Amino acid sequence: MRSIKGERFEFCHILAGIVELTPEGGKPVVHKAGDSFVMKPGFVGAWKTIETVRKIYVTVK
């Protein structure tokens, strides 16, 4: 799935599952249960769910 972030930061904490994020023109990064990350405003890339994901997320402008 294509992911395009507007003007907001998105903090994610993965509770279960596996996801692969690939920034446009970048290398894929895999996140799994227990991992946390921030997607910055303007992020453009691909979100690939490898295993069903449960997450907690917060968006902030």
Image (spheres, helix red, strand yellow):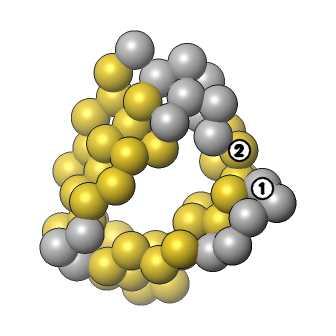
* Image vertical order of residue 15 relative to residue 17, above or below: above
Q: Residue at x 64, y 31 (%)?
A: 42
Q: Residue at x 69, y 73 (%)?
A: 27
Q: Alpha-carbon distance for marks 1 and 2?
A: 6 Å
Question: Residue 44's mark?
Answer: 2
Looking at the image, tell me whether mark 1 or mark 2 is earlier in sequence order: 1
Q: Using the rendered view, name the quadrant where residue 35 is placed.
A: bottom left
Which residue sits furthest front? Answer: 26
Q: Secondary structure at mark 1?
A: loop
Within 10 Å of disc 1 (Cα), the crowding (few <14, some 14-19, many 20+) is few
Q: Secondary structure at mark 2?
A: strand
Within 10 Å of disc 2 (Cα), the crowding (few <14, some 14-19, many 20+) is some
Q: Residue at x 50, y 36 (%)?
A: 40
Q: Is residue 55 visible?
A: no
Q: Using the rendered view, name the quadrant where residue 17 is placed.
A: bottom left
In the rendered structure, which amino acid carries the disc numbered 1?
Glu
Q: Tell me where residue 54 appears, x and y as whole percent.
A: 26, 66
Q: Is residue 60 visible?
A: yes
Quadrant assignment for the C terminus: top left
User: Are the two marked residues, 1 and 2, in contact with CB atoms closer than 8 angstroms?
Assistant: yes
In the rendered structure, which amino acid carries the disc numbered 2?
Val
Q: Is residue 49 left or right of residue 24?
A: left
Q: Tell me where residue 59 appears, x and y as whole percent.
A: 34, 29
Residue for badge 1: 24
Q: Is residue 10 left or right of residue 41?
A: left
Q: Tell me where residue 13 appears, x and y as whole percent.
A: 23, 57
Quadrant assignment for the N terminus: bottom right
